Amino acid sequence: MSSDRENETRREDTLFVLGRVAWRLAQVALVTAGVIVLFNVISSQRADDAEAIASMKIDLQNLVMVQEEYFLTNGRYGSVSSVLSQAGIDTINGSHVIGEATATGWRATATHSGARYRCGVFGGDIAPPRKGAERGIPECWKP
């Protein structure tokens, strides 16, 4: 009869060990799933930033072309908002462009609702929106 008792004890020990193994496997699966989700969120955010940066650069490059045309026609630069509206250029995909202009220069900065970055550009004789920026070339940075 002690053999029945030994068998029962072995069965309990085996079930206990199997339960611990199953619990450990569940923990590993949850951690792995968490890492995969985190990776996807980070990748998605980088893609959103890249799309928003491209959108802001397009808006600023359009502004460069319109300001240069305005300068050639009028002999001075126009205000950023009026030049954009006169040219019929709407900012795209959530970009918001703000700027300032004098008769001899202008600068603008773009932000986007979906980006952690800011982009800027300038033209003529005015301080750039960011140190080291090149005239007429949109540049982006993390504020």
Image (cartoon, rainbow, N blue to C red):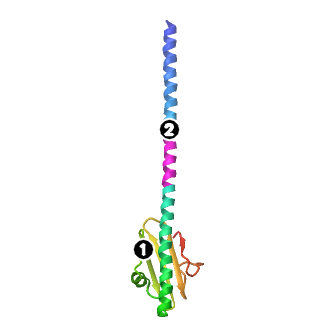
Label 2 sits on residue: 27
Label annotation for residue 91: 1
- Dot 2 amino acid type: Gln
Element type at mark 1: loop
- Dot 1 amino acid type: Thr
Real-space Cα separation, disc 1 to disc 2, in angstroms: 48 Å
Could you tell me which residue is drawn at 48 percent across and 14 percent down? 8
Element type at mark 2: helix
Q: Nearer the viewer, residue 127 or 46?
A: 46
Tell me residue 6's x, y (percent).
52, 12
- The verdict on residue 40 being magenta is yes
Asked if 42 appears above or below 89 in the picture, the reply is above
Of the two numbered discs 1 and 2 on the same chain, state the one appearing first in sequence.
2
Tell me residue 14's x, y (percent).
52, 21
Residue positioned most to the top:
1
**What's drawn in magenta, residue-wise?**
30-42
Tell me residue 21's x, y (percent).
52, 30
Tell me residue 94's x, y (percent).
41, 69
The rendered magenta stretch, by its main secondary structure, is classed as helix
Could you tell me which residue is drawn at 46 percent across and 84 percent down? 100
